[in-house]
Image (tube, helix red, strand yellow):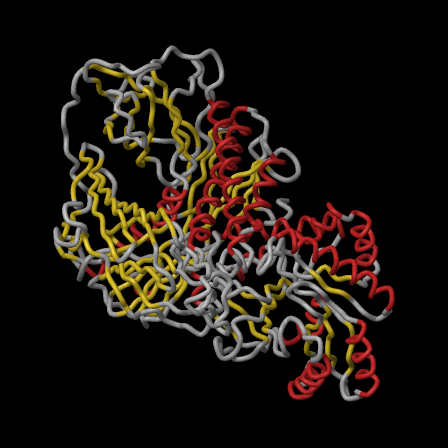
Amino acid sequence: MKKYKVHLICNAHLDPVWQWRWEEGCAEALATFSNAVQILKEHNELIFNHNEAVLYQWVKKYNPKLFIEIQKLVEAGRWCISGGWYLQPDVNMPGIESIIRNIIEGRRFFNDHFNVVPKVAYNFDSFGHSGGLPQVLKLAGYKMYIHMRPQHPDLILPSNIYQWQGVDGSEILGYRIEVGLYHTEYENIEQRLKEGVDLSLKLNRDVPLFWGIGNHGGGATREDLRKIDEFIKRENRVEIIHSTTEKFYEAIKEFVAEAPVVKGDLQKIFTGCYTSLSRLKRGEQKSLAQLLQAEKLSSASWWLNNAKYPADVLQEMWNDHLFNDFHDILPGSCIEPAEKDALDLYGKVSEQSRRLMLAAANSFNQGEYQSLYLPVTVLNSNFSLTKLPVEVECMISYRPKWEGVWHLKLFDLAGKEIDCQEEQPEALLPFNGWRRKISFMAELPNVGVSNYKIEVLPGEKKKAEAKPKINYQFDETTGLINQLFIDEVNCLSGNLFEPMVIEDNADSWGTNQWSYRNVIGKFKLINGSHREIENGSIRKITQSILEYNHSKIVFHTIAYSDWNVLEFRLRIYWNEERKRLKLSIPTIFKNEKLLCEVPGGAIERPADGEEHVNGRWIMVNPPDGKTGGNRETENDIEDFGFAIVHNGQHGFDNKDGEIRLSVLRSSAYCHEQGFKIEQFPSRKFSDIGVHEVRLLLTVGEKNKVLKSLSSLVDWLNAPPIAYAHLPIGKSLSNNKLLSISQSHIQLHAIKKSFEGEALILRLQNSVGNQSDADIEFFKPKLKFHLNFEPFEIKTIRLEKDGRWKEVNLITEE
């Protein structure tokens, strides 16, 4: 009879950050890898498995000799480069381009330094897995995906070997760890061996057993190897071998044809992680958007104007950004010093992004300068929004104009006046309006630069009032919107974004806590605070200040005359321990489900009152459970959509037409429920302090609303960059890179190819229907047509002579 195998997959799960900071993670990586090399020399059958390129990069930098030894062991087949990603990230909340770069960075590093291309990806410890991931895994060349969480019964699977089908229809073989965890303890290796043998005999197939001390590193111990050798001598029913994830895949790939299909994402576990350490959630969105904006504009500057491409700087920025995607950083389960380190990294990426964007702006403005009183340069990288709001501040003179009244006018360089509105700048100095701020609706190239000029004129500017595109009304007693009309139907059933204080005694992860619905307090309007603070031809801004206990929220509601969006800017002063802040969105749409973004696509979530995760937007009343559709009746409210776009509020619940968006949660730092928190001594609680939260609301015909969401996300997190006073050349260079005919075809990335002088575009159909688009370039003059399946991602390579083709995600060839 055939003997099945128990594959002993030795590893050392090593969180680079968790209860410790990255320096300690680095130190432990050096120790663990050094220990693994030594034990491999002592035990001829052992194979060590490890992924996460960041750890190998640390070894290469701080112990080059050890790195060379590892390279030799990999070549000899004793050390398996498994997984092949940069690190094990959260895969619920990052933008899909961040996940793609995580894979690209890892696979390119391991291929360059070890000549290895793993077939098996794994995220043992990540807290749920996006339904957009199977497509990316397939595009990256993977054959199988291994995970541990969510475990049974949090996620009930028909089999632990299954075909995982993503939201786009892509399928990849999935495997959930069946025996133990991704590691072993000091005293349980024999128990795990017995469990592995029993399971293999029960299922009549090979099974893996992941072993090795892990979490703070470790790996194989000599004592465990002794016990394993003795167990192997006694066991004759199955074959027990030292193995790898790659060998295990080869052993079970015959089961692919009969494996049951599991559709959608793999949820859910640790609901607190959708909100914990909210500064990191908002930081991730802003960092990714700014980084992609800087990369796109640097690429346009290089392609159009022959500017130097900052490849090394961008590489460093990507590594810094990706590090914070780690599954104990972004989900908020780390200690406070690690949170501060992560925020420092986001700040570093932001600063470098600003430097690159200023360089790009300057490259478009080269040559002898025009004689302009006050030049303005605006950079845009949001290809699907070309008419959009822009804000810019400036000084009206080198010294204050101490006497007289002055106003600003905005013109394009041909002399055409652009309507603008003066508003209060950040500075509050009483210098007769020396510092000014204007807002205007700009007509911008999809990816490129527009130039304007400001003139300072004497006298008052003629007053005008905004005529908001969206019809709404305030409840004067609460300072919140309580009526919002779609075709004269109020789609609200209460106060929009009413702040609710929710009981939340769960630990950092939200372990075994599936809903947060117990309202223990509400914010109330401070008398006299609800007032209009700006009103002009471009937009109207209303302020309301609400308070609860020792906390308050400053609401700014912004309504535009020529934009189908309501914008909300919240400045939150939060001083509540072990509580959660939710914002209520009470609608008349009592659907059983709503549609929300996930990394790489969109998926429906049930209206069950439980906490769920979303990407960057939520849409109520999606058409027939799909992500597209046609309007059938002119006045049928069922044909309309209502959507919220946010800057990092990933947790929400939905019940009886009311969405409650989780904004903050002040759980104790790195706290597990087994540790009881008493009143004294005092502990540290997260999210205490000041927070800037931004939200967009758009309503209308649901297909149009849906197709606008990806561009609104980009605008919210990376609006156009405006520079006042930057000199503008007389002979302006090319200022427009490309255009795309369909707004729902997302332009995730524009970059220079890793090899050669080509331009790389990453595009995705953001809706769940087949679609097509025309892509037009202006240098060289070129237009081509692409067809997209639902949620399909394409990577396009364009040569300078106009040749183009669809290429591999990793190699770009």
Whole-percent x and y of residue 700?
23, 51
Q: Which residue, as the protein is rendered here, is positioned at the far front? A: 680
Quadrant of residue 717 in the image?
top left
* Residue 486 visible in image: no
* Vertical relation: 731 (above or below) 48: above
Please tell me which residue is depicted at 23% across the width and 40% down the height of the picture: 560
The answer to which of 417 and 761 lies nearer the viewer is 417
Whole-percent x and y of residue 538?
22, 34
Please tell me which residue is depicted at 25% across the width and 40% down the height of the picture: 563
- Label total for image: 0
Whole-percent x and y of residue 522?
24, 61
Please tell me which residue is depicted at 81% across the width and 82% down the height of the picture: 232
* Residue 319 visible in image: yes
Whole-percent x and y of residue 388?
31, 36
The answer to which of 13 and 764 lies nearer the viewer is 13
Along the horizontal axis of the image, is 206 left or right of 435? right
Please tell me which residue is depicted at 78% across the width and 82% down the height of the picture: 239
* Vertical relation: 295 (above or below) 523: above
Quadrant of residue 567 in the image?
top left
Q: Quadrant of the C terminus?
A: top right
Along the horizontal axis of the image, is 707 left or right of 261? left
Along the horizontal axis of the image, is 252 left or right of 263? right
